[in-house]
Amino acid sequence: MKTLAKFIYFKREELGLTQKGLSVASNIPLSEIEEIEEGRILFLSVTQRQALAKVLKCEPSEIKILEKDIADNIISPEIIESLKELILNGAGGLKCPKCGAALDTKIEKMYDLEDNLVLHPKAHCTKCPFQIHS
């Protein structure tokens, strides 16, 4: 069975790219490339998917079909929105709503088409597959 992590890894290797090379070419932080290949990031934004597809010489749909939108299937949208607000407000020590383990959180800074800063809260559980993406 193919996973997103394996697909990205093998496509990158096939093209002779390092993780850092893929990071630079796709304009995705190296830490996120590492997390994708480790299987810690299971869902990509449209922008990330398109950038990776361009560099890896494949169609975005080949990547999308392997993504897993874990959070939406197991936790209510209200809890996820509440966690997003807490992350944006700088709350620390957040726990996974599924298993109670610590959440690793970060705020991704992006810009919209009018060059306005847009903040996207992200989190993933340190023990189970739960994650929050924007």
Image (cartoon, rainbow, N blue to C red):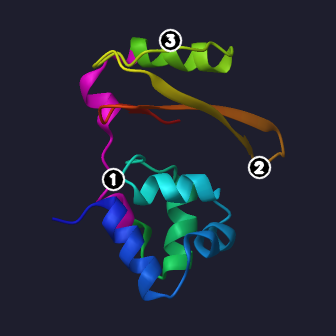
Residue 96 among magenta residues:
no
Q: Which residue is mark 2?
A: 113
Residue 114 screen position, x and y as percent:
82, 45
Which quadrant of the structure image shows residue 99? Answer: top left
Q: Amino acid at mark 2?
A: Leu
Element type at marker 1? loop
In the rendered image, the residue lying farthest to the right is 115
Tag shown at residue 67: 1
Q: Residue at coordinates 54% horizontally, 14% vertically from top-left?
A: 93
Frontmost of labels 1 and 2 is 1
Q: Which residue is mark 3?
A: 82
Residue 45 screen position, x and y as percent:
52, 49
Q: How many numbered tags mark residues here?
A: 3
The answer to whether any part of residue 58 appears in the image is: no
Q: CA distance from mark 3 to mark 1?
A: 24 Å
Residue 104 screen position, x and y as percent:
51, 30
Q: Nearer the viewer, residue 44 or 104?
A: 104
Q: Nearer the viewer, residue 16 or 83?
A: 16
Tell me where the magenta segment starts and ends, as one range.
62-77
Which quadrant of the structure image shows residue 77? Answer: top left
Q: Earlier in the sequence, mark 1 or mark 2?
A: 1
Q: Earlier in the sequence, mark 3 or mark 1?
A: 1
Q: CA distance from mark 3 to mark 2?
A: 27 Å
Q: Residue at coordinates 43% horizontally, 67% vertically from top-left?
A: 60
Tag shown at residue 124: none
Element type at marker 2? loop
